[in-house]
Image (cartoon, grey):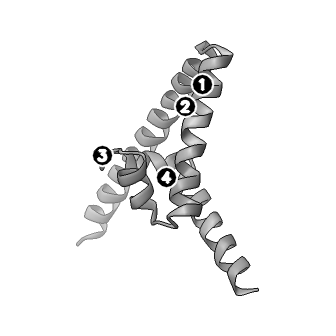
Amino acid sequence: MTDENNKKLFEGLDELRKMHEEGLKQYEADNDAWWHSLTEQEREDAFYAVIKRMYKAEVEDRGTYRWALYDVFGFGMGMYGRGMDCGYMTLHNLVFDGLEKKEAL
């Protein structure tokens, strides 16, 4: 590859990164607006449903990130990246590492 081709490639990748960041910011704003539009009971129900599934996936089943998304939550493959965007993969890894450390003691 020539330097000019490399430059074009990096410019294209930078543009894609910027588009992703803008899309994520918009999604987060829309998601926050949705959350605040819920009644307190609906927020409590959503919280309960998510945490119950996280507990099953992370503590009871000790499954992988994919296991949690696909088998416990029932999401399709499109949720993989969104789970990373919202920090769930990081939480999954922290819980896994914490449980492993606890067992080693």
x 76%, y 86%: residue = 105
Q: For the residue marked with disc 1, what is the amino acid?
A: Asp
Identify which residue, 66 or 21, lies in the foreground.
66
Residue designated by label 3: 76
Callout 1 secondary element: helix
Residue designated by label 4: 84
Q: Position of residue 75 (x, y in %)?
A: 35, 44
Give the Cα distance between marks 4 and 3. 14 Å
Q: For the residue marked with disc 2, what is the amino acid?
A: Glu
Residue 11 - label = none
Disc on the earlier residue, 4 or 2: 2
Depth check, mark 3 against mark 1: the one in front is 3
Q: For the residue marked with disc 3, what is the amino acid?
A: Gly
Give the Cα distance between marks 1 and 2. 6 Å
Q: Report whether residue 62 is seen.
A: yes
Residue 28 - label = 2
Q: Is residue 60 left or right of residue 70?
A: right
